[in-house]
Amino acid sequence: MSAKTRIVVLHMREVIYTVIFAALAILLILLLVFMFRSGKKGGDAQETMGYVSGVYTSSIVLNNQTMDVKVVVDDNRINAISLDNLDETAAAMYPLMQPALDHISQQIYEKQSTENITYDKANQYTSTVLLNAIKDALSKAEVAKEQ
């Protein structure tokens, strides 16, 4: 019954890598648990409005030039917002139209709503005109859903 002594050599680099990978694995597991857990707070709120899939437009008239705001929707999502019939002269006369629309549409894509949209004070009139046109186009697409 002899006891054989074994010597284990651990390289510090391997120990550090192992600890880092274990910490990342735990962090990933926690992230997945929080992201995919069931049960939502405020579960009583139900969506009452939806959209009829399609392309809807609303016109804006500025100095006898008509531009169309085109909104593309699915049943539950706003997919695209763009300006149509914006010729070069209108773009030169109203250079803030496209940047303001890009800023507003990015917020609408994230929120999927026209509520609580923010815009710069320098673009407030342009943004208000565009936002009203988007709301008008979305009102054409809205349909009440059964609960």
Image (tube, helix red, strand yellow):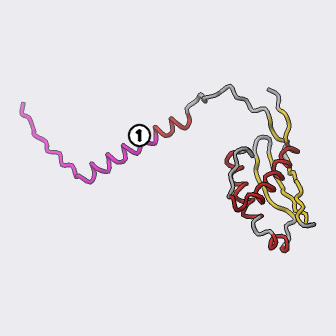
Query: Is 104 or 141 nearer to us in this picture?
Result: 104
Query: Which residue is the extreme one toward the left?
Result: 2
Residue at image x 72%, y 61%? 123
Range of the magenta residues? 1-28
**Three-letter residue code for mark 1:** Ile
Residue at image x 81%, y 56%? 129
Q: Residue 139's x, y, as percent?
A: 85, 44
Q: Residue 63's x, y, as percent?
A: 90, 67
- In this picture, is 141 found above or below 120? above
Q: Is residue 19 left or right of residue 71?
A: left
Q: Residue 55's x, y, as percent?
A: 86, 51
Snapshot quadrant of residue 113: top right
* Label 1: how many Cα within 10 Å (few below 14, some 14–19, many 20+): few
As for residue 18 lying within the magenta part, the answer is yes
Q: Is residue 109 left or right of residue 31?
A: right
Q: What is the magenta segment's predominant secondary structure? A: helix
Q: Residue 125's x, y, as percent?
A: 77, 58
Q: Which residue position is annotated with label 1?
A: 26
Query: Is 80 or 115 nearer to us in this picture?
Result: 115
* Circle 1 SS class: helix
Quarter of the image for the N terminus: give it: top left
